[in-house]
C-alpha cells in the first residue's frame, strides 16, 4: 500500500511538472507579420526572428527561421508559437536562390530586405534596438522589403 502511494505521488509530480512545459503562455496570440515589396514571385522569402541582441549582431542563432517558397501563399506568418515578449524580425527575398542573404564585397545587400518596425536607416546602421518590438502591443506587423 505504501509503495503504491509513493508511485502514485511520483506520477502526480511528473504530470504536474510536465504541465508547466506544455502550458506556456504566449504573448503573441494575436500577432501576424506581413511581408510586402517582393521583387518577383519566384524567389522564396526568409524571415529570421531574434530575441537576443548578441545573436542579431553576430548574425547567428536566430530564434526561428521561416522560409516560404510560394510567394502567393505567403501573405502572413503567424507568431502564436513564440512565448517571448520582445522580438526583432529580419526578412529578405532570396533572389539568387542560394538560401542566404547575399551582400557585395563592401557588405551592401544584393537582395531585397526589411526589418520589423521598418527603420529608415542604411542596412549597416540598423541595430537590434531599432527592430525589437513588444509583441503585446501589436496585432499585425508589416515588413516592407527595400
Image (tube, grey):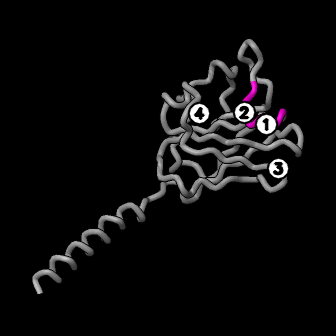
> Does 1 appear above or below 103?
below
Give the Cα separation between the discs numbered 1 and 4. 21 Å
Residue for badge 3: 71
Question: SS of the residue at dot 3?
Answer: helix
Category of crowding for the residue at label 2, using alpha-carbon neighbours closer than 10 angstroms: few (below 14), some (14–19), many (at least 20):
few
Q: Earlier in the sequence, mark 4 or mark 3?
A: 3
Which residue corresponds to the image point at 25% horizontal and 70% vertical from the top-left? 13
Q: Earlier in the sequence, mark 1 or mark 4?
A: 1
Q: Quadrant of the C terminus?
A: top right
- Judged by its main secondary structure, the magenta piece is loop
Marks 1 and 2: in contact by CB < 8 Å?
yes
Query: Closer to the observer: label 3 or label 2?
Result: 2
Residue for badge 2: 100
Which residue corresponds to the image point at 36% horizontal and 67% vertical from the top-left? 19
Category of crowding for the residue at label 1, using alpha-carbon neighbours closer than 10 angstroms: few (below 14), some (14–19), many (at least 20):
many
Tell whether position 3 is magenta.
no
Q: Which mark is residue 94?
A: 1
Residue for badge 4: 131
Query: Closer to the observer: label 3 or label 1?
Result: 1
Amino acid at each position: 500500500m505504501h509503495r503504491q502511494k509513493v508511485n502514485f505521488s511520483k506520477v502526480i509530480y511528473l504530470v504536474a511538472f510536465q504541465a508547466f512545459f506544455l502550458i506556456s503562455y504566449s504573448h503573441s496570440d494575436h500577432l501576424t507579420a506581413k511581408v510586402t515589396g517582393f521583387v518577383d514571385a519566384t524567389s522564396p522569402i526568409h524571415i529570421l526572428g531574434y530575441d537576443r541582441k548578441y545573436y542579431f549582431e553576430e548574425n547567428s542563432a536566430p530564434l526561428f527561421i521561416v522560409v516560404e517558397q510560394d510567394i502567393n501563399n505567403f501573405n502572413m506568418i503567424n507568431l502564436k508559437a513564440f512565448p517571448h515578449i520582445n522580438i526583432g524580425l529580419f526578412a529578405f527575398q532570396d533572389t539568387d536562390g542560394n538560401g542566404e542573404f547575399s551582400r557585395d564585397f563592401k557588405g551592401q545587400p544584393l537582395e531585397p530586405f526589411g526589418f520589423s518596425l521598418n527603420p529608415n536607416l542604411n542596412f549597416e546602421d540598423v541595430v537590434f534596438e531599432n527592430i525589437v518590438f513588444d509583441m503585446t502591443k501589436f496585432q499585425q506587423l508589416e515588413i516592407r522589403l527595400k
